[in-house]
Amino acid sequence: MPRPGPGAGTVRAPQPPAYGHPYSGGHGAGQTPAYGPPPYVPAAPAPLRDSRSTVLLVAIALVVALAAGGTVYALMNGGDTGHRAGGDPTPPPTSAGAPESTAPDDPSPADRPSTSAPADGTVPAGYLGQWSTTIDNASGEHTRTLTIQQGKVGDTVMSLVADGPAGSGTYHCVFEARLTADPGSGDRLELGASSVTVGEPRSSCTPGAASTITLLSGDSLQRVTTGTGEQLTYTRD
């Protein structure tokens, strides 16, 4: 076999590609990217909630809660709906918002019945007995029954029973008041602040202020709250 000529050199076999790089074929497809995962790119942080929107939502929730609480409170204590019974003579408000009265505000003495006082007490006879009135308004029918009994200054001479609707239920209240002054000629009875003796529910029955009771013509009388002038007229049963 002939020997290679001088200076021919040594023919080396092709070397495989370096580890980690793909073999490049001869089809001109271009260089293949290096192996391994793509570079790590952190995810964009979630947008922060607008703090002003959060504050606004909290404020709206508080307003709604306060309004609901106010409504409940109004239903339990009467408010504008007439559910609350008090020892004073204020009637539940009507649609017109005025006290109900069926007699003149200031009847003349000549129109009043005889009020001579019996020997065993100072309350004139014309006041004694049971009197009542009915109040109709948007919440329903409310009744008031007033009873005056004989007595002297310092004695309990008046009791008042109040009944009516209250929200989804009803209320029943009983009040008492003492005589605070000698009626004298019988122009009027002066009563002290009333106290609650029965309250169902108790939240619907509140003690009333001092008041005066005056006889009117036609078997009726009028009870007026001292200081405010609020009034309610009753007729004899």
Image: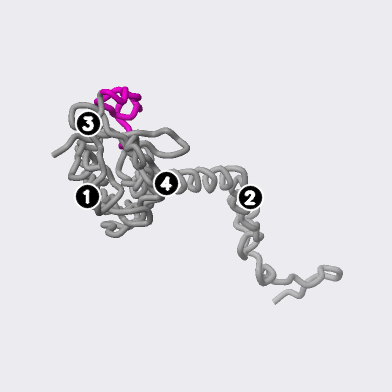
- For discs 1 and 4, the disc positioned in front in the rendered view: 4
First-in-chain label (3 vs 2): 2
- Residue wearing tag 1: 170
First-in-chain label (4 vs 3): 3
- Residue wearing tag 3: 113
- Residue wearing tag 4: 209
Vertically, is 140 above or below 40? above
Q: Hey, what amino acid is under mark 3?
A: Pro
Q: Hey, what amino acid is under mark 4?
A: Ala
User: Across the whole image, how many numbered discs are drawn on residues?
Assistant: 4
Pick the front one: 91 or 175: 175
Q: Hey, what amino acid is under mark 2?
A: Gly
- For discs 1 and 3, the disc positioned in front in the rendered view: 3
Pick the front one: 168 or 36: 168
First-in-chain label (1 vs 3): 3
Residues rendered magenta in the picture: 90-110
- The answer to the question of whether label 4 and label 3 lie on touching residues, with beta carbons closer than 8 A, is no
Q: Secondary structure at mark 1?
A: strand
- Near mark 3 (Cα within 10 A), the count class, few <14, some 14-19 or many ≥20, is some
Vertically, is 191 above or below 203? above
First-in-chain label (2 vs 4): 2
- Near mark 1 (Cα within 10 A), the count class, few <14, some 14-19 or many ≥20, is some
Q: Residue furthest left?
A: 237
- The answer to the question of whether label 2 and label 1 lie on touching residues, with beta carbons closer than 8 A, is no
Q: Hey, what amino acid is under mark 1?
A: Thr
